[in-house]
Image: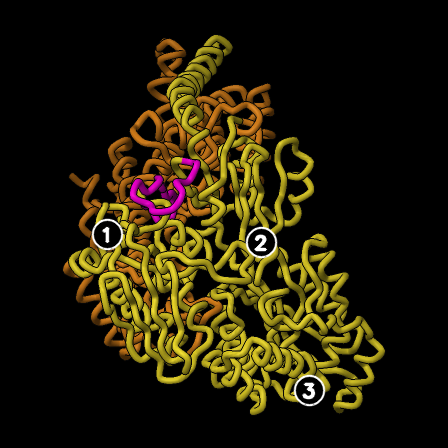
Amino acid sequence: MIRRNRSRILGAALAALAVAAAGCGSSGSAGANGSSAATVNTLVIANAVKVDTLDPEANSVNESIWLDQNLYSRLLQPNATGTGLLPDLAQSWAISRDGLTYTFHLRTDAKFSNGSPVTAADVVYSIDRSRKFAGGWGFLLTAVKTVAATSAHTVVVTLSQPHTPLLADLAMYAYSVVPEKLVKAQGAAFFQHPVGSGPFMITSFKADSEVDLARNPHFYGTKPKVQKVRYLIVPNDNTRVLMLESKKADIIENPPGNLITQIDKTPGLSVQLFPSTRVDFIELDEHFAPFKKALVRQALNYAIDRKALVKLAYQGHATPGASFMPYKMQYYDSSLSPYPYNPAKAKQLLTQAGYPHGFSTFLITVSGDVAGQAEAVVLKSELAAVGINVSIQSYELTTAYSKEDGGHSQMGERYWTNDIIDPDEVATFGADCTGGANAFASYWCDKQVIQAVAAARSERSAAKRQQLYSQIQQAVYQQSPFVVLDYSPYRYGVGGWVHGFHVSPLGSYDLSLENLTVSAH
Amino acid sequence: MSRFSSLPQRCGHLVIVLFGITLVTFFLLRLLPGNPAVAILGTSYTPARAAAIDNTLGLNRPIWSQYGLFLGHLFQGNLGFSFFYGQPATTVIVQHIAPTVFLVIYSAVLAALISFPIGFAAGLRRGGVIDQSSRILFTVSFAMPGFWLGIILLLVFSVHLHAFPISGFGGGFAQHLYYLFLPALTIALGFSTVLVRSLRAATIATLQAEFVDTARMKGIRWRRVLRRHVFRNAILAVVAVFGVNLAYLISGTVLVENVFSLPGLGSLLVNSVADRDYPVVQGVTLLFAVLIVAINLLADIVQAALDPRVGQEAGA
C-alpha cells in the first residue's frame, strides 16, 4: 500500500515538472525563431558594463563613449588609426596666422535623425554646453574665449592664447553636437531618447540591460550596411563567452584572458586584439617616504620582469612599456625601451638610496580585475626578491580609485586611456602635478617638465612639439614617478560571420560599424 | 481571534526595524571610501572636477542634514534622486522590480514542486532509493555556488541543447516563464535541499505520532491518513523554514541575476553600490528589508492559519 502511494506522489511530481518544462519549451521555440530571422541585418554586441549616460558632456565610461559616437557627430573626428583627424560636420577649417582664431565651415546637408538641419547655432550651443558643464571636460578648453556662429554654416572659435590641441579637443566625444532647441525644451529627458546626426539613432534605451540602434535615415554619410545594432549588457565574463559560442552575440568585449585560447580554438570564433592607447602602470605615492627618492623608483623598474608579467597576466597579449605615453601615438618617443630586468641593479640602487634591506609597503588592486590580480601576484614575488615586502590590498573599483587619488596610498594598479589623439591630455594628467590629477596621483612635481607641458600646448610647430614631448617622456622615464608596465590592447571576441570590425586606438569603432557586414550564421 | 493576536505588535516591530535600517544603510554607505564623484570620473578624476560634482549632488552638506533630508523625503514616499539614472530612485526601483519578484516567486514555486514530493517520499520510505539518491543529489547541488551552477546549466541547456536563452527577461508572461526557467532552477535547486531535508524529518516525526496510529486504528484508509494527517502536519513544520529561507533567496538573486544578465533589483543594488548611487542603494535595501520582514510575517500568518495552536500560548 505504501509502495503504491509513493509511486503516485512521484508520478505527480514528475508530471508537474514535465508540465513546467513543456510550457517553457513551447513558448521558447517561438522566441528563438523570431530572433534568428532578423540577425543578418542586426549586429549584436555584448558589453560588460552598463551605459552611464547618452549625454556626451557627462560620459565617462568608455563603452558608453564608444556607443555615443554612433549617435552624434562632431566638427571633426579621429581617423581609424588614431593618428590624425578627419572632417565630420566641418568640411574644412582655417587657422589664423597668430593661431588665435579657428574658422570652421560646416557641411550644408547634415541633418539630425528627426530630419531637422544641423546649424552653426547647434554647434555653438553644444560646445558651450559641454565646456561649462561642472565636472566635465571644460578644463581642456580654458584657452577658448568665445565660440560663435557667424553664419548658418560657419563657426568661429577664438582663443586667448595659442592652443594647438584645439582640433583634437573638438574631435572629442564631449563636443558632440546636439539639437539646441530640443535639449533646451526637454532638459535631461532628451538624453533618454536623444536625437543626433550620426550614422545610427536610438530606438530603445535601457541603460543596464539593452540598447537598440537603427540606421539614421537622414545621415549625410554612407548608410551603414547593417540596419540595426543591439547592445546587450552582460556583466558576467563567462556568460558573454557563452553568448558568443551559441551565436547569440556577434561581438563580445573583453573576453577573459584565460578563455582566449578556448575561443580561438572554437571553429568560426576568434579573439581580435586592437592596439589601444591603454597604458598599465603602478602608481607610486610620494607621501610614502621611500618613493620620494628617484633611486628607489628606478630600483622598482629594474626589479620588474615585464616580459614575464605580460606573459602571466595578459597571456602574452600586451607589449612591455617604456614611455608613459600610449604606444605609438602622436609624438611617442620610440627611442625609449623598457627598463631591463636586473634585480642586482635594483638591489644596488636600493642600497644607494639607504634601503639596503628593502622596506614594506602595500599595493592597491581592484577586486574582480583578473589580469590585475595576476599582475599583483607577479609584482609581489619579484619585489620580494629585492627585499621589498608588498602586501596586496584588494578593493572594489571606486574604493580603490578613491584611495589612490587621495594621496594616502603607497602603490596602486592603474591604467590610462586617451580621449583625444593629441598628447596634451596624457601629459597634463600624467606629468604635470599642477594639471589637476597630481601627475597620476604620484604627487611628483618637476618644474622643467611642467613648463614643457605648457610650452608644447601652445607650440604650433610639429617638429618643436616632438622635441618637447620627447623631453617630457625622457624625464618621466628617467625619474619614473610611476612604474610603466605595459601597453595592453583592446580585446574583442568576434564571430567569423562578422566582416570588417575594427577598433581605433582610442577605442571607438563607429567608423567600422558604417561598413561592417554580418553574414548568415 | 487569539491566533492572530500578535499581529499589531509585529507590525510595530516592523517600523522600528525599518527605522534602524535607514540609519544603518545611510551611515554605512557614507563610511565607504570613495564617493559618487570618484565613481563618475573614474580615471579622469581631478579634485576640482570632484568638488563640482559634490556641489551639484548636495554632498558637500553636513551629513546630519543629509540624513534629515533623506528621512523627511522618505515620509513623503520620496527616496531621492538617483545620481546615476538622473530619475527619481522610486522610478528606477520600480523599473527593476519585475524580474526579481518574478524570479523569487518562480524559484519558490519550482522549489516547492521539486522538494515537496521528494521530501515526503523520502520520509515515507526512510533509506529507500528516493531517500538516498535525493540526499546525494541535493547535498551536491546545495554545495554548488549559484554562479557556478548557473554557468553549468547555461552550458548544457543553452549552448549545447539550444533549449533556453542565455540572458534577458523576455516580454509577456509566457516569455518570462521561458527566459527565467534556468535562473529560477538555479535558485530552486539550492533552496530545495533545505526543504527536502526538513520535510523528510517532519514526515518521519509525524509518522511516529500517536494520532497517526489512532487514525489507522479507526480504520481510516492509509491514503486519507497520509493526506489529512501526515502531510498536513509535516508541511506545517516546513512553512517556517520556507519563510526564513525565502528571505535568503532574495539575497541569492543578486548572484544569479549577474550570471543571467537579468535587469533586476540584485544587479541594480550591486551596480549602485559601485556607483555610490546612495538614493538607489538606500531604496533597494529598504525594499529588501520590508520584503524580508513581510515574508516572515506572512509565514507566521500562514502557520497560524494552518495550525490552531499557534499563538494560543501568547493569548492565554
Residue A311 falls in which quadrant of the image? Answer: bottom right
Mark 1 or mark 3: which comes first in sequence?
1
| A208 in magenta | yes
Q: Which residue is mark 3?
A: A294
Mark 2 or mark 3: which comes first in sequence?
3
The reply to whether label 1 and label 3 mark residues of one chain is yes
**Left or right: where A463 falls relative to A420:** right
The color chain B is rendered in: orange
Question: Which span is picked out in magenta?
Answer: A205-226
What amino acid is labelled 2 in the image?
Answer: Tyr
| A203 in magenta | no
Q: CA distance from mark 1 to mark 3?
A: 57 Å
**Residue shown at 38% from the left, 53% from the top:** A68
Q: Which residue is mark 1?
A: A117
Residue B271 falls in which quadrant of the image? Answer: bottom left
Q: Which residue is mark 2?
A: A490
Secondary structure, magenta segment, majority class: loop
Mark 1 or mark 2: which comes first in sequence?
1
What amino acid is labelled 3 in the image?
Answer: Ala
**Left or right: where B278 falls relative to A275:** left
Residue B71: image x %, image y %? 21, 66
Residue A299: image x %, image y %? 75, 80
Query: Which mark is nearer the camera, 1 or 2?
Result: 1
**Residue in front for this viewpoint, A493 or A227:** A227
Label 3: state its secondary structure: helix
